[in-house]
Amino acid sequence: MVLPSLLFLAFIVVQRLSELVIAKRNTARLLARGAHEVGASHYPVMVAMHSAWIFCLIVFGLGQPVHLGWLAIFAVLQVLRVWILTSLGARWTTRVIILDEPLVARGPFKYVSHPNYMLVVAEIFVAPMVLGLLWVAVLFTVLNAAMLWVRIGVENKALAPMRAG
């Protein structure tokens, strides 16, 4: 049956497109407040990787059975996603935008430095598993690890002066 996988895939596509709209709006507002972007050169690579992940989910996942255990884990991750996004509020964006203000220290940021990246790591593995696509989960987990190695390094370097104070 195609409908369960279609609904799952539609959720992911609508969610990611909605987040891009939110991120673009937040980025523009932050830049208008005097923030600046760092690491812009790796951003197109990250977008391409995430786009390829979604493309693979759609091409190879449409019509696959939906595994309810993995779907339950994915649902829990979405609750965490909402917690992260609401904790960051207008500071959430898909780019590394540095604002000369104290770092967010509420919500999951009280406990870990990069909860959004931890969430994305989990989602990149779990979403393909909902559709039984182990090879997609493994391939994009490896690609995402390389991407995050670059991105977190850039972000940590840019935020180091704010953390020292």
Image (cartoon, grey):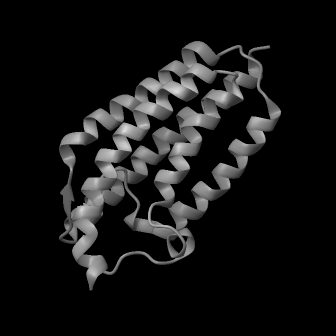
- Tell me: 150 left or right of 124: left
Residue 30 seen in the figure: yes
Residue at the image point whose x is 42% and y is 53% from the top: 22
- Tell me: 107 left or right of 21: right
Image quarter (top left, top right, bottom left or bottom right) of the N terminus: top right
Residue 49, x across and y down, in percent: 38, 30
Q: In which quarter of the image is residue 28?
A: bottom left
Residue at the image point whose x is 69% and y is 24% from the top: 131
Q: Is residue 136 above or below residue 47?
A: above
Q: Residue placed farthest to the bottom in the image?
A: 165
Q: Is residue 114 above or below residue 19?
A: below
The residue closer to the viewer here, 21 or 78, is: 78
The residue closer to the viewer here, 137 or 103, is: 137
Q: In this view, does 17 lie above or below 54?
A: below
Residue 85, x across and y down, in percent: 51, 61
Image quarter (top left, top right, bottom left or bottom right) of the C terminus: bottom left
Residue 164, x across and y down, in percent: 27, 81
Q: In which quarter of the image is residue 11?
A: top right
Residue 100 seen in the figure: no
Residue 25, x across and y down, in percent: 34, 55
- Tell me: 113 left or right of 15: left
Residue at the image point whose x is 45% and y is 32% from the top: 142
Q: Is residue 2 above or below residue 19?
A: above
Residue at the image point whose x is 51% and y is 19% from the top: 56
